[in-house]
Amino acid sequence: MSAFISSLKQHVHQAKSENLWLLAGLSLGLFPHFARLPLLITLPSATLLIWRLLYDLRYFSLPPQWLRWLLTLIAISATYTSFHTLIGRQAGVGLLVIMLCLKLMEMDKFRDVGVVIGLGFFVIITVFLFDQSVFTGIYMLVVVSLLTTSMSAFSREFSTASQWLNLRQANTIMLQAVPLALLLFVLFPRLPAPLWSLPSDTFGAATGLSDSMSPGKISHLSNNNAVAFRVQFDSEPPPLNKRYWRGPVFTQFDGKTWSKPSTYQMNPVDEAAASFSYRTLGEPVHYSITLEPHNQKWIFALDLLATLPANSTLSPEYEIISKHTIEQLIRYPMSSYPDYLLDVDTLPNPAIYLQLPPDSSPRARALAKQFRKEAKNDADLVQIALLYIHEEPFYYTRQPPALPDDPVDEFLFDVRRGFCEHYASSFVFLMRAAGIPARIVTGYQGGELNPQSDYYIVRQSDAHAWAEVWLPQKGWQRIDPTSMIPAARIENQQDLARILPDIAQLGTPPNWAKAAWRQLQFGLDRVNHAWNQWVINYNDDRQRNLLNRLLSSFGFGEIDWQKMITLLAAGMGAVLLLIAIFTLRSWRRPQRDLVVIAYTLFCQQLARRGIQRGPAEGPVDFSQRAQQLRPDISPAIARITALYLHLRYAPQARSTQRNGKQAPPKQLRHLQAAVRQFKA
Amino acid sequence: MANPSRITLQTASSPLPASKPHRLSFKRFFQGEGPETGPITLVQRRVYILPSKMGIYFATMMFVMLLGAVNYTNNLAFALTFLMASISLVSILHCYRNLLSLRVDVGPIPSVFCGDTVQVPMILDNQQHAARYALKLQFYQDKRQESPEFQSYIFTDVGADQRQRCNVPVRTQQRGLYPLPRVTLRSSFPLGLFQTWAHAQRDAHYLVYPAPTQKHDLPNAPSVHTHLSGDRGKGADDFAGLRTYHHGDSLRHVHWKAVAREQGMFTKQFGGDRSEELWLDWESLPGMDTETRLSRLCRWVIDADASQLNYGLRIPGAMVPLGTGPGHRHHCLKALALFNADANVSNDVSSNVSSTGSTP
């Protein structure tokens, strides 16, 4: 084993250092892609990478020319087989990765290494297209450091100094570059819109609510702890039972799936806004939401919204619909009235809220008829139905059994175990069967305060579905049938905490490990939130706001791009100047050679008397000249010169040149004494 | 050497030494400053820097990356592009520093035979507390006559506060005394994105001896092997006495004890007397062209010296009296190297040429 290690060390020693640094950087840089790309790309790429490493360590030779051409053809066809195209984000990255690895097979010239290092940096950018998290950012900093180190090794291929010096050099430069990069990041003018339209697969798949609801659609999110959005309240946050974040609303039911009517337009005309009829009560709450990308057009807000974010419209169901798909993190300020009356006087189009598939779920229809008989009015009927859920043995579970034939009947009468979507769906069915207009609202409920900061985290696991029923004189009322289930019938503690927080708090206190873990998670989320706000979502708007706020105190006036460029140039100049002073100032240390110090003193003494040693004048010539000019002190000059010559050039003294400490002490003392006594 | 006028000049003139006006000129950019006396310090105005090919490639790459970042409004892509741009900017300073304030000097240049390579000892004195890496040194030489196997440059590092001596090759094509061409110091350290360079030309000369011919018997060769009367053939063994130190004497032969006793510099002399006397004479080689004659004489000088003969050289316009030892050898070879055909034997050579030309 140790023999193997020592032989490996030998191989590493023989390998070209810049190639090893480069391969290390490339492997780390490509890794996130390897985890994401199909195996058909990953496997050959990784093989080529390892092949190159083994070549550099002198275990293997590189493939011949014909094999390289063959491999290239195979690589292109593998990419095409995997993606059925060669353009677009996914396929483009696949092609870049495999071609880069192929380039390693013919990287033997100076120029090739440069090309590969450049492509290595390009790979990092493509990773950022898929993932912009803090972790990826820091990880890629390591990759940049390794690639820069390979550049350093590359630029001194002929130098014999230690390899770690390259790492140090690269990191020194990177550290000095960070302030410049920060200035550029903050001050480089951002554009509000892309320069040209992007291919459709630009942004990756994201989780979130979908545009239809069937059993299982939301419960699959229940274990997903990913953040849906974060909310920062500027005023007092509303209580939990009012924190319903409204998302897509569904009105059409086909017996299994709730969806939007087929005539529904995703971009409703603005005239629709005229038909909104609502009354607000009480004070509005002000808050801002940082929404994670979810590849849909929904924008979430508390009921009932008072403002619309930029580039969005309001649908007749009071959903906010963005003009563009939410493909990147966005942040928008919002205001809402938690207390409101909606469509109190008339319901514009009741038929669509009473639609039911014909002949489905006969048992549920019978139950609805029974409710209608018992109820005095519509409001009473709603209460009866809720009581039914409360009293009958309905359970709340994350693993609902399959409901293959008739989800409503099977849930209400046979299984009685389900998730929020089952309750909302069955409840709306019952209401409609009883003649009460009703609709399904999906979105998120609640949200968790980050105790280390002042914002709420709403996760995908907070996804929820509830019902809205229209009652005369009261308008649309939010009814959450899930909340009627008693605590004893909620299986999961987490769900209990969400649905019935008052009861959950009485439960067993979490142990310290769990508490610490939660604190850590909150801390990480806080970092993520800050990262999202200041790095990912630093756009033209935010840039302008930030700079205006920063510069208003200096009387700078409204910022524009000319001012940004001026500031940027000035700032960069200043920082570069600082680095230049730090780097270029002469680090001249005091002369350490005692022999030279003594002899220089002697020369200075003579110079003061007008006998200057010429720049190319040797000590012997100088001594002769000085002795001729000053015969009176000739012996002293000769003695000092002789001592100096001896210390400097005698064979036993020569080895100690430029290291005065080790000069023979006796003669050195003689020289120093002679110079001290020397008076020209 | 002792030059009183120089002293008065130094004290009387303005504190700044008179120097050429340092304006921007292309000549300086490409050719440097011309020959200079004394060590050359690479001050700011002498050190140039421009992007290398790789730097231009990287700049293009960064532009593409910036376009991508703008278009995808991807802030981490922005951050990476800006970091790379900043790294490149900072690397300019580090690259420039790698040459700045370096002192360049040249040591005594050994004389070589024509066709050999002169290893010019360059002395790089780094007086700063930061090492300099991967300096490429190359003398300006006619590129057209460069053969592919001749490596005209060397790479060297200079440690912090170190003086580094390195031999930079110069090709020789003709005998004679030549001014040292300018040396160009280049470096693309630390990242290869920029290349910095500086020209330095010292006012030194190097001597190229004629190329010796193939082994050839000495003229009227004395029977060296049977007549070992002076010394035992090895030479330089027997202490013969002291004489005052001359420039060029081996430091190994300096009588250091006398120096320490402050009696002055003396050189120990070794070796015995030769009884044989050998004159190497231009006239003994009639009917050859000048260069061949010089080459033959050169060969004889080498052989006579190797055999430790007491020899002298007679060529038109120069005569080196009998002598031995490395100094003597050098004097002889120098005379051959500097032999000027036009000045000395123009008649001789022309007659030679005409005779060979006219006689059928």
Image: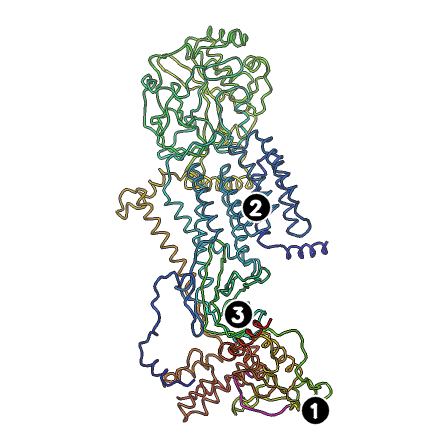
Q: Which residues are magenta?
A: B239-249
Query: Which label sits on residue B164?
Result: 3
Please give the chain letter of the residue carrying mark 3.
B
Q: Position of residue A198 (x, y in %)?
A: 45, 32
The residue closer to the viewer here, A205 or B210, is B210
B311 or A116: which is nearer to us?
Answer: B311
Residue B91 visible in the shown view:
yes
Tag 3 and tag 1 share a subunit: yes
Distance from disc 3 to disc 2, alpha carbons, whole Å, reads: 37 Å
Residue A311, image quadrant: top left
Q: Nearer the viewer, mark 2 or mark 1?
A: 1
- Residue B88: percent from left, percent from top: 45, 52
Label 2: which residue? A26
Front of the two marks 3 and 2: 3
Give yes or no for contact between labels 2 and 1 (Cβ–Cβ under 8 Å): no
Colouring of the image: rainbow
Point out the tag, 3 or 1, that comes first from the N-terminus: 3
Q: Residue at x 42, y 62 (%)?
A: B47
Q: Mark 1, chain letter?
A: B
Q: CA distance from mark 2 to mark 1?
A: 76 Å
Taking the view exactly as shown, the residue that stands out farthest to the bottom is A632
